[in-house]
Image (tube, rainbow, N blue to C red):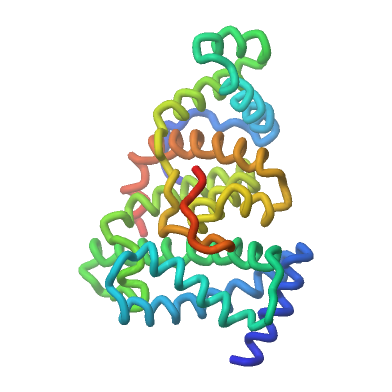
């Protein structure tokens, strides 16, 4: 684990400089750590899943970056990556849950993710994830803003810091992104059930 | 993506224009937006898209305003700003 921590610290520094390769290498490390911690939290506590998610990512961050003082910019970038990772975890979980419902449970939902996300919202999440992919194809920055704000829970200011743009730009993009997604979700509703059925 | 009756997608190039107009239109009184858009947007396709988005904006309400799992805020747990 020590070497992994050093790797993460180096990678975080690279990510802060804007190296996309470093971000890609960092994601699996963060993913593994978050999954592991998620399992531990779920077994230990049954309370508000909102609090668990926050504590979960904070703990993962502290474990992975054992520097006495990490400046705020590094933390913001870490949370930006965590947002992306959480999106993947949640969508994978939703997909697994929907498969279970259809397929008679041949593929059990991993226990460490079983309680992170309310199962009844899986369908909605899948719809949103696909709409978000379409928005990202149209405007990558807007897609990232939605990922950071909705999946990562970052504030406007934090999102601005991670992306290196002004808070005003974030607000504008966020506003039109929500409108666009709202419309796209309505349009895709009829197709999504069929697509999910085709697995 | 399968058979779809979704409206013709706006191009990424026009999308920048659409976003700017959408933002500007929101600053204008709702009753004046119709005229505002006709005066500031000669491109019919872009204008239609802006009007569609304004309509969605009105319907969206609290859509996406709460993060899916709460806050990963780098500064600690603070409620979402939006």
Query: Farthest residue toward the bottom?
Result: A2
Nearest the eye: A145 or B16: A145
> In the picture, residue B5 is in which quadrant?
top left
Q: Residue at x 66, y 36 (%)?
A: B12
Report x, y in % for residue A82: 55, 66
Q: Is residue A108 left or right of residue B56?
A: left
Q: Is residue A78 above or below residue B52?
A: below
Name the residue at the left extreme: A104
Residue drawn at the location 54% of the way across and 48% of the way down? A146
x then y, percent, for residue A34: 48, 75
What is the total number of numbered labels drawn onto the structure image? Answer: 0
Report which quarter residue B37 is drawn in: top right
Q: Position of residue A9 (x, y in %)?
A: 70, 79
Q: Residue at x 66, y 8 (%)?
A: B39
| As drawn, B78 above or below B7 | below
Residue at (39%, 69%) from the top-left corner? A52
Q: Nearer the viewer, residue B28 or A25?
A: B28
Above or below for B54 versus B81? above
Q: Is residue A184 left or right of residue A111?
A: right
A158 and A142: which is toward the camera: A158
């Amino acid at each position: 684990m020590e070497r992994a921590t050093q790797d993460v610290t180096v990678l975080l520094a690279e990510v802060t400089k804007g190296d996309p390769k470093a971000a890609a290498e960092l994601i699996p490390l963060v993913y593994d750590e978050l999954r592991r911690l998620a399992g531990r939290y779920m077994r230990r506590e049954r309370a508000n899943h909102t609090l668990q998610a926050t504590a979960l990512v904070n703990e993962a961050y502290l474990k992975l970056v054992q520097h006495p003082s990490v400046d705020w910019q590094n933390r913001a970038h870490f949370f930006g990556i965590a947002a992306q990772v959480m999106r993947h975890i949640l969508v994978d979980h939703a997909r697994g849950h929907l498969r279970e419902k259809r397929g008679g449970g041949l593929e059990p939902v991993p226990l460490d993710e079983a309680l992170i996300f309310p199962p009844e919202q899986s369908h909605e999440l899948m719809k949103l994830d696909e709409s978000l992919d379409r928005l990202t194809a149209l405007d990558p920055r807007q897609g990232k803003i939605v990922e950071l704000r909705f999946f990562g829970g970052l504030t406007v200011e934090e999102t601005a810091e991670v992306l290196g743009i002004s808070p005003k730009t974030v607000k504008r993009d966020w506003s039109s992104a929500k409108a666009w997604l709202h419309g796209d979700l309505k349009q895709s509703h009829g197709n999504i059930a069929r697509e999910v059925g085709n697995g | 993506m399968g058979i779809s009756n979704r409206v013709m997608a706006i191009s990424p190039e026009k999308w920048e224009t659409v976003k700017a107009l959408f933002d500007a239109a929101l600053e204008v009184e709702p009753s004046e937006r119709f005229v505002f858009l006709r005066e500031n947007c000669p491109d019919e396709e872009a204008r239609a898209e802006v009007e569609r988005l304004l309509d969605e904006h009105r319907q969206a309400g609290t859509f996406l305003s709460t993060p899916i799992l709460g806050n990963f805020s780098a500064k600690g747990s603070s409620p979402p700003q939006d």
